[in-house]
Amino acid sequence: MKRTEHGRSALLGPLGLGGVLVSAGLPHCGSSSSGNSDVSCASVSVDAAATTSPTVCYPDNDGITGGSYTIALAVNDTGFTSTGSDDNDGGVTKNIIATQNDAMVTLTLTNTGTTPHGFQVNCTSVCLSYPSLPAGCSPLACFPSNSTIAPLMPGATMTITFDTPTPDGLLYPFASSAPADSTVQGLNGSISQWSLM
């Protein structure tokens, strides 16, 4: 895994990267073919076990991987906001987190709400960026389990460190991990996305 050290602002507001992705469409370079053993991504069962290396399954789409990112978020009863010096608009609603794939992330979450809230990144299909897959590759990509923060009591803060997945050019929904938040639009993953570039 190639890791480059470069600090970046990892959060963009509702009109930042999100506006670009919606108006321009997500660029999909596709995967490189490894011969006749490739299969249509859509034909692979979502329960298929990955038996091939992620770097073989998901060639990097933009030629850049790695880096270190520090992300500071607050979660309240309606959504996520930026709290850190990682950007210049602390306190603004954050619907997009943008980092490179195979990057190291340090994420701090503070619950400023009145009920328990947490953080999790949901799995996503890789088929838009990788329409054909070598045998042994999963059509789903997920963040590692250590990227989840269990619901925190109001006023509590937790910091975690994890590596982002290899498949890039994809949007992974992020949400609160508290079951009661599943009906709250700003907390249920319906509008909040992690963009792996």
Image (cartoon, helix red, strand yellow):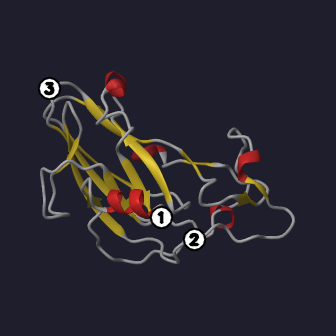
Give coordinates of residue 33: x percent, y percent.
76, 70
Image mark for residue 121? none
Horizontal arrangement in the rendering, residue 93 relative to residue 187 (left or right):
left
Q: Residue at x 47, y 41 (%)?
A: 122
Q: Residue at x 71, y 47 (%)?
A: 42
Dividing the image into 4 quarters, which one contains the C terminus?
A: bottom left
Is residue 70 placed above or below 124 in the rendered structure? below
Whether pointer 2 and pointer 1 mark residues with C-beta atoms closer than 8 Å, the reply is yes
Q: Tell which circle, 2 or 1, labels the residue nearer the N-terminal end.
A: 2
Is residue 46 placed above or below 56 in the rendered structure? above
Q: Measure the C-alpha gap from mark 2 to mark 1.
A: 8 Å
Question: Which residue, given by chain and number where applicable, does mark 1 sit on?
Answer: 101
Give coordinates of residue 138: x percent, y percent.
68, 50
Kind of residue sitting beneath label 3: Thr
Give coordinates of residue 94: x percent, y percent.
25, 50
Whether pointer 3 and pointer 1 mark residues with C-beta atoms closer than 8 Å, the reply is no
Q: Measure the C-alpha gap from mark 3 to mark 1.
A: 34 Å
Question: Which residue, given by chain and number where applicable, does mark 2 sit on?
Answer: 60
Count the labels in the image. 3
Q: Residue at x 30, y 28 (%)?
A: 184
Horizontal arrangement in the rendering, residue 42 relative to residue 60 (left or right):
right
Q: Tell which circle, 3 or 1, labels the residue nearer the N-terminal end.
A: 1
Give coordinates of residue 31: x percent, y percent.
67, 67
| Residue 111 seen in the current view | yes
Question: Which residue, given by chain and number where applicable, does mark 3 sit on?
Answer: 114
Kind of residue sitting beneath label 1: Asn
Mark 1, other Cα within 10 Å: few <14 / some 14–19 / many ≥20: many
Mark 3, other Cα within 10 Å: few <14 / some 14–19 / many ≥20: few
Q: Measure the C-alpha gap from mark 3 to mark 2.
A: 41 Å
Is residue 47 placed above or below 160 in the rendered structure? above
Q: Tell which circle, 3 or 2, labels the residue nearer the N-terminal end.
A: 2
Q: Residue furthest top?
A: 180
